[in-house]
Image (tube, coloured by chain):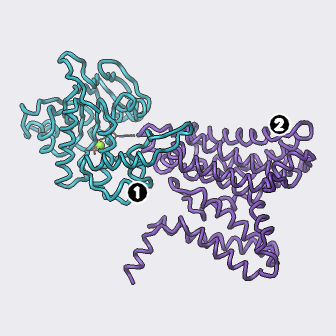
Amino acid sequence: MAGKLAQLRSVDPSQYIVYVGFVLILIGFSIVLRDDGFLTTRNLLNIVQQTTPVTIMAVGMVFVLTAGEIDLSIGPIVAVSALLASLVLRESFWPLGAAVGLLAGAAIGAVNGVLVAYVRLPSFLVTLATMGFLSGVARWITDLQSVPITNDTFNAIFGAGSLFGVPSLLIWTVAIVLVGHFFYHETRYGAHVHAIGDSAHSARAVGIKVDRVRFSVMVLSGVAAGLAGLLYAGRLHGARYTLGETDLLTVIAAVIVGGTRLNGGVGTIFGALIGSLLMGLLNNGLILMGLSVSEQLMVRGLIILAAIALTLREARR
Amino acid sequence: MSAAAAVPASAPPVLGLHNIRKEFGGVVAIEDFSLDVRAGEVVALVGDNGAGKSTLIKIICGVYPPTAGRILIDGGDVRFSDPSESQARGIQVVYQDLALAERQPVYMNLFLGREATTGPFRRLDRKRMIRESEELVHGLDVRIPSARSTIRDLSGGQRQGVAIARATHWASKLVLMDEPTAALGVAETQKVEKIIRGLRERNLAVLVISHSLDQVFRISDRICVLRRGVQVGVRNTRETTNNEIVSMITGLQ
Ligand SMILES: Nc1ncnc2c1ncn2[C@@H]1O[C@H](COP(=O)(O)OP(=O)(O)OP(=O)(O)O)[C@@H](O)[C@H]1O
Ligand SMILES: [Mg+2]
């Protein structure tokens, strides 16, 4: 008995617990909500589509956390890039609007990256400050007004459109997760991201350009948040300063529950996807159960806490 | 990796250090250090704790810039601004703290910074890295469970074995070793000493730090003594005695 227990303990639970949790919660809601249309293709597809922006930011966040950094500024990056894109779309054709949204994310990420990698300030404080600054910018750009988007092509590509019958948000999710997985797990770049988060000092000693990799993950996260902004704008046919406001907690919870370590060097992209779907599932199920918004927030907070506690047990080994 | 052709006696030393000085914010760690290390030669660097031995190695490989002095590789002045530049010249280091990425597998550590890749996206060739790691580790007699084991699941000695395997594999000119046998058992220490002799046979230059004078006398051609940042002398190993080295280290007669 004791031997079995020790054997069980030696398995790293953080890597698979998200899958177990996902299945358990799926089964739980399927039973409780069997008469409320929870377990329908339409509802499940809906969940995937609603979580697309969070999933994409989670992919970026896996790179950032693995590199031993954090990006707290993703929420307002979403709003700023969505607003800038929609302003451009009033005057111009859709590729320019999309490019502006992505470039805004990249530029903000680059500012974060310079401050973290080259000025060598802690990313926690840098992005805390940019988060505050950008929330102001998001309110200031349009003076709290929302901006509608009437460009149908943009709204189709980044929102409710589909290609060969496959919803475009689903395509975005699959594409970004696969590309992210490839670069994270399969390439030399990904190996260096792991190495600098594991031990920046050792990485430098073997000749890895630590500063450059650090800078790049901050830019990557900025671009991911910029893309998330476009996807929100496309789905809602417009932008508003509140976009992305509450996503930071969801993204970090999704990533950590998915098996990525807060202190660097270890992570998984597929885990982050499942973590993100799990958050979407919770949201959806709690709404269908008829919980009030305040009840939803409390239940979600408790579940996230439980999940993180389970996941991080390994860290104290 | 083939042994270099015999170097004529007149060839410049692989490593030349001239009047190296290092201050850390006003505190002098190294004061006026000079030493040559030739190809096919093992020089031992000895001295008490805090004498400046590790600092010297970090200056040579580019972790720290010297405050003053010249570093020559093959007779030419160099100024490495980070370790990747010294690596490019065939210099490898076994750091005192080993410089391993603890949560990554052994094979990634052996290839860290010079991963085997294929294709335009520099896709990792894991199969090849694992295969070569297994050969390498096996060839050096480092006993680890597998090339896929995570570093932090290894013992201190096994970790040291990985760090030594990495340095000796990639070096083509000079190996700097900072207490490479500090965590090793008797048998493993003998293996590392054999590895060092192998490096000499490959005509590499070796600078090795050790606190074990017995070991120093077994493996080195020359012994350089550092006391509180000052180079107090270099002796041919065959022409000196344990007592002389001890009194040089401590400064007592
Ligand atoms: N980064 C640093 N900043 C300030 N002082 C340093 C730094 N690195 C080393 N020193 C100082 O320089 C001196 C030499 O240190 P060093 O690590 O080179 O000693 P060592 O000879 O390797 O000792 P040991 O045998 O204990 O490893 C010490 O007084 C140390 O405190
Ligand atoms: Mg030392």
Task: Report if residue A292 is visible in the image.
Answer: yes
Q: Is residue A211 above or below residue A54?
A: above
Q: In which quadrant will I find the N terminus of chain A?
A: bottom left
Residue under the point 19% across and 49% down: B189
Specify the label residue A96 is tagged with. Answer: 2
The amino acid sitting under disc 1 is: Thr
Residue drawn at the location 78% of the way across and 42% of the way down: A101
Task: Locate residue B239, reporting x and y percent.
Answer: 6, 31
Q: Choose top left, top right, bottom left or bottom right for residue B195.
A: top left
Chain rendered cyan: B
Gap between marks 2 and 1 measured at Cα: 47 Å
**In the shown orientation, is residue A100 left or right of residue A176?**
right
Q: Is the residue marked by circle 1 packed among few (<14), some (14-19), or many (20+) residues within 10 Å?
A: some
Q: Amino acid at mark 2?
A: Leu
Instruction: From the image, state the color of chain A.
Output: purple
Q: Quadrant of residue A115?
A: top right
Q: Position of residue A28 (x, y in %)?
A: 69, 79
Secondary structure, mark 1, is loop
- In the image: residue A134, left or right of residue A258: right
Q: Position of residue A87 (x, y in %)?
A: 88, 41
Within 10 Å of disc 2 (Cα), the crowding (few <14, some 14-19, many 20+) is some
Compared to residue A104, the image places residue B203 above or below, namely above
Residue B150's disc number: 1
Where the C terminus of chain A falls, by quadrant? bottom left
User: Looking at the picture, does residue A303 appear above or below residue B205?
Assistant: below
Residue A202 sits in which quadrant? Answer: top left
At x 36%, y 24%, the residue is B68
Q: Chain of mark 2?
A: A
List the single residue furthest toward the bottom.
Answer: A1
